Structure formats: C-alpha cells, structure tokens
Amino acid sequence: MNPKEIGYFLKQLRSEKGITQEHLAEILGVSGRTVSRWETGTNLPDLSILVQISEYYDVEIKEILNGERKSEHMDNELKETLLKVSDYTELEKQRAAKAGSLSFGIMFLACVVTIVIQMFMTGNLSLIIGETVILLTGGLIYIFSTVKNGAWNGTIVKSTPKKDLIVSIICAGIFSILFFLILKKNVAAPQAVAAAVCFFIILSAVSYFLLRGLAYLSQRQSDKLKD
C-alpha cells in the first residue's frame, strides 16, 4: 500500500467529479487542508471517512487502497479463478455422487441375488414378494433423494426414451423368466406362462415410466441449478 499512489488516485477521483478540495471537505465534514494532505499522500483518511469516500466516488475500498481502478485483466483473472473453483467443486461432487451410487448399486445387486437364490431354494412367493417390495421401495427412495439433490445428472449415460425402453424390457424380461421358473413348480405351465407374460408387461410399463419420470425430474433439477 503506497500512500502517494492512494493520494494521487483520490485526486483523480475528485477531478473526475469536477469538484474542489473545499467542496469535498464540506461533503465529508473535514477541512480543506485535510483533503489536501490526503491527496499528497501525507496522511490517509480514517476508516469511517474511507467508507464515505468509497460510496461517494462509487469505487471499492480495495481500489482506493491499491491506488487504481480494477483493470479488465484483474476482472478476467478473478472470473477465471472462480470458474476453475466452480469446476473443481462440481467435479468433487460428481465423484462423491458416483462413489455413493456405485456402493448402493453393489448392495442392491447383492440383495437381488440373495432374493433370487431364496426363490429357488424355498419357492415361498409371498415372502419373496414382500422382500422385493421392500428392496424396490428402498431403491426408489434412494433414487428420488439423489435426483432431488442434483446427483442424478446424466453424466454417465444420457437418458433417452429409446434407451429407457430397452433397459425396462431387459430388466423386466430377466425377472419375468425367474418368476416363470419359480411359478411353474406350483402351477401348470400354461398358467405360469400367462402369469409371467402379465408380470412382464406390468413390470416393463412401470420401469419405463419410472425411468422417464426420473429423467424429467433430473432435467428440471439441472435447469433449476443453471438458473
């Protein structure tokens, strides 16, 4: 901080306003000699007076202390730094979200495999259905939470109606086949096929509309964050 540079800058600001030292002194409630000593760098304004000068000249206190206005170069450097910090923060958020999603996915698959094994071992459909409902409810709650907090941002796989339909059909097909294999142990084959087909249609529709709903919520959340 150079008092001479500050004084020269204060003199420039006063000249831009087109006022005399006496006029400025009246505005700030000080003597003309005090203003003169500021502008020569002999003395510096008190903090309270500095705030008044900043407001009167419409400049930042930092600019007065630096003895110059903020340059375009300084503004660009600040913007670039802020953008880098923003990108870094977003990257860290994405890494944390991916790590959490991966952990949840592994746990979810382990539960599914356990339920499938239990299906073949016990054949107790009522128990399996109850466990499946609980598992799906937990998964839906988790996914809704990630969407609401902006973690489901489509950076890994871009959601489209066609992709969502394919995923729904594949997943529903796998579970329908398993459902048929368990069901045919207890009922006739034609009845098991009919039940499996109905199960496939319902599960495909529910899965598809769920994925499209998540895509819609995710897009809304992304648009809200951009705004």
Image (tube, rainbow, N blue to C red):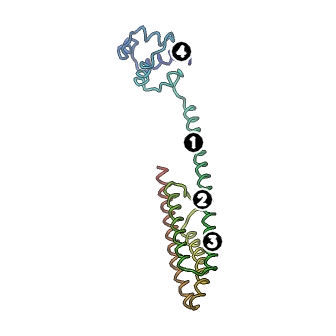
The residue sitting at 62% across, 75% down in the picture is 116
**Residue on which the image places disc 4:** 3
Q: Secondary structure at mark 2?
A: helix
Find out whether the residues at labels 2 and 3 contact each other: C-beta distance under 8 Å: no
Q: Position of residue 184 (x, y in %)?
A: 59, 87
Q: Secondary structure at mark 3?
A: helix
Amino acid type of the residue tagged 4 in the rendering = Pro
Q: Nearer the viewer, residue 89 or 191?
A: 191
What crowding class fits label 3: few (fewer than 14 Cα within 10 Å), some (14-19), or many (20 or more)?
Answer: few
Real-space Cα separation, disc 1 to disc 3, in angstroms: 46 Å
**Residue on which the image places disc 1:** 83
Amino acid type of the residue tagged 3 in the rendering = Thr
- Disc nearer the start of the sequence (1/3): 1
**Residue on which the image places disc 2:** 101
Residue 123, picture quadrant: bottom right
Real-space Cα separation, disc 2 to disc 1, in angstroms: 27 Å
Location of residue 28 with respect to 122 vertically, above or below: above
